Amino acid sequence: MDDPPSLYLDPDYQMAQGWPFTALHQACDGNMQALLYLAFVVSNNGNGPEALRYYRKAARDFNNLEATWWVIKIYEYGLWGVDADLVKACQWMKNVLMTIESTQDQWKHPKIRRDIIVNYGWYMLGARTSALDGQPQLELPENKRNVTDGLKWLERAAEMGEGDVASTLGNIYMTGENPKIPQNYEKGMKLLQIAAELGNGKCAYQLSISYMIGLVPVDEGKYRFWSKKAVELGYGEAVERIAMHTKGFGIQREEAEKEIEKLEREEDIEFILTTDESTKCSNPPCEARETDETGLFKVCVACRHVKYCSKHCQKIHWKSGHKQDCPKLKDQKEEAKKTNIDMIRNRIVDD
């Protein structure tokens, strides 16, 4: 009997060749292609438990990354009638990561590897699974999360060129919005720079503003460089500021007063002073984001540092820790605003 066909052959191929299904089943031992093919056939027939069995065997017996990826997705989303189990999905992800870490193995499938690294990292921080065909969104129980491990792999993903990860994680570090992740300007700036170098104009603009207002040591050269970069990348807000480059780092009194007025209304450095510039609800378990349909979320009237998609999320977050954080955030925000206003006034130049 010839070797069984690969995973990508037509499911009816075996019948055309006159191969009985039981013969293929018997050929599975010691034959990875047979395992993958059978998993494909039974999954096409909606038999998730059998598909899972074959994929698991291919993954374990042959260390096959493609099979491992399917095991993860079956558990992650409850495919083909299998009960979704995010804990098991993350256990399989961790097995892949341990192999990468111990052998520096780059695998044959970089996209699959990156998918596993990114998803594992966000799940460890409490992210939910994506909505898929009406399936309920899952998140790891608190006792199964590991923020330190999640951050390590997300930072690795950013260094591998995942720009969205670099942008989102950079802003988390810059804002200190997650009570479990300490604010860290050094890491935040490093990640924003990665995102900017990958073509994110908004991150380039954030870098320029950070060097101007003193979140990191003020540096006119870097402010100019990243402002110019943001303009080159087409980020609109940077275009207005580029005019300053022609008249030095100073600012005319009339323009300074306008900048200060914007700060007082919290319109200018929102990415620093409010919770998630990506427009996510501030209740950590909630993945809701502002859209044209939802409109802007309601901001906490006390600290104006967090925002919520609903009163339900506001109540949950209040009880889970914002009640204690709110006064501190309010004080931090007022101090940041005062610092920024002082910085602008120090740059005023009169004709």
Image: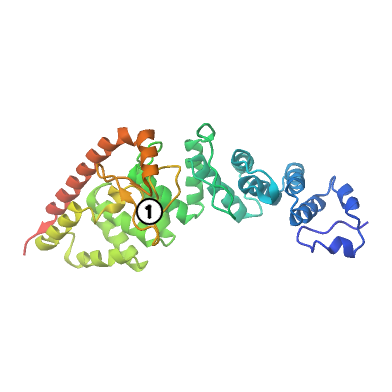
- Horizontal and vertical percent position of residue 289: 41, 53
- In the picture, measured across the screen, residue 350 lies left or right of residue 341, that is left
In the rendered structure, the answer to whether residue 7 lies left or right of residue 113 reads right
Q: In the rendered image, which quarter is residue 182 located in?
A: top left
Image position, residue 7 (x, y; %)? 76, 57
Query: Is there any visible trace of residue 327 in the rendered image?
Result: yes
Identify the residue shown where x is 39% and y is 57%.
294
Identify residue for label 1: 279
- Residue at 33%, 63% in the rendered image: 230
Place of residue 74 in the rendered image (x, y in percent of width and height, measured from the top left): 66, 48
Secondary structure of the residue carrying tag 1 is loop
| Residue type marked 1 | Thr
* Residue in the image at 84% along x and 48% along y: 28
Q: Seen in the image, is 279 located left or right of residue 8? A: left
Q: Residue at x 54, y 52 (%)?
A: 131
Q: Residue furthest left?
A: 351
Q: Quadrant of the N terminus?
A: bottom right
Which of these two is toward me, 46 or 13? Answer: 46
Q: Could you say which is closer to the camera, residue 341 or residue 226? A: 341
**Colour scheme shown:** rainbow
The crowding category of the residue bearing disc 1, from other C-alpha atoms within 10 Å (few below 14, some 14 to 19, many at least 20), is some
Quarter of the image with the C terminus in it: bottom left
Look at the image and tell me whether residue 65 can be seen.
Answer: no
> Looking at the picture, how far across and down is residue 243, in whole percent?
21, 67
Q: Is residue 65 left or right of residue 126?
A: right
Counting every numbered tag in the picture gives 1
